[in-house]
Amino acid sequence: MNPRIRPWTAEEDLTALAMRRDGARPPAIADALRRTRGAVSSRLKYLGLAPEERLQKNQAKCDGRTKRAQGVVRERITPSNNKFVPPAVLEERERRVMATRTITETLFGDPVFHRSALGKKTAGVST
């Protein structure tokens, strides 16, 4: 249990329910009980459950059968390895990879001359 979280007392439960019956909104109840709005809203929802539902919720929490433990929470999207690549694209890639390169192109990663900005400018191709 988180040490910063104070357990709810029976007195706080009764106060919260009485204030809610009188028409108070959760922010006002939170200020009166020195709790957060979310804590008050969650507690009022919990107190509104039938005793059997509360028992099931507490047992599920103790057994680790929460939504996250059950795998109900969103699954991660993984990229698919079954992508179709047209043969022409694979051939062009293979041709570029296997092209003869100078030692500086290989060591320093310089682009092939006709693929660089200077090569395109010299050849008259716009970038």
Image (cartoon, grey):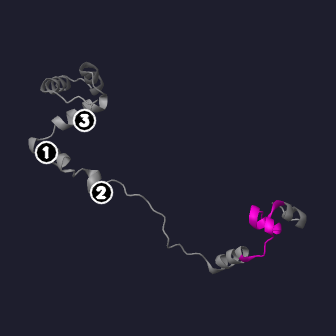
- Mark toward the start of the polypeptide (2 vs 3): 3
Type of amino acid under label 3: Ser
- Relative to 21, residue 79 above or below: below
Element assignment for label 2: loop
Residue 92 position, x and y percent, is: 70, 76
Residue 53 position, x and y percent, is: 13, 45
- Viewer-nearest of discs 2 and 3: 2
Residue 53 marker = 1
Quick one: 120 or 108, which is closer to the camera? Answer: 108
Q: Residue at x 67, y 79 (%)?
A: 91
Report whether 119 appears left or right of 67: right
Residue 42 marker = 3
Q: Residue at x 55, y 75 (%)?
A: 84
Quarter of the image containing the N terminus?
A: top left
Element assignment for label 1: helix
Numbered range of the magenta stretch: 98-117
- Mark toward the start of the polypeptide (3 vs 1): 3
Type of amino acid under label 2: Gly
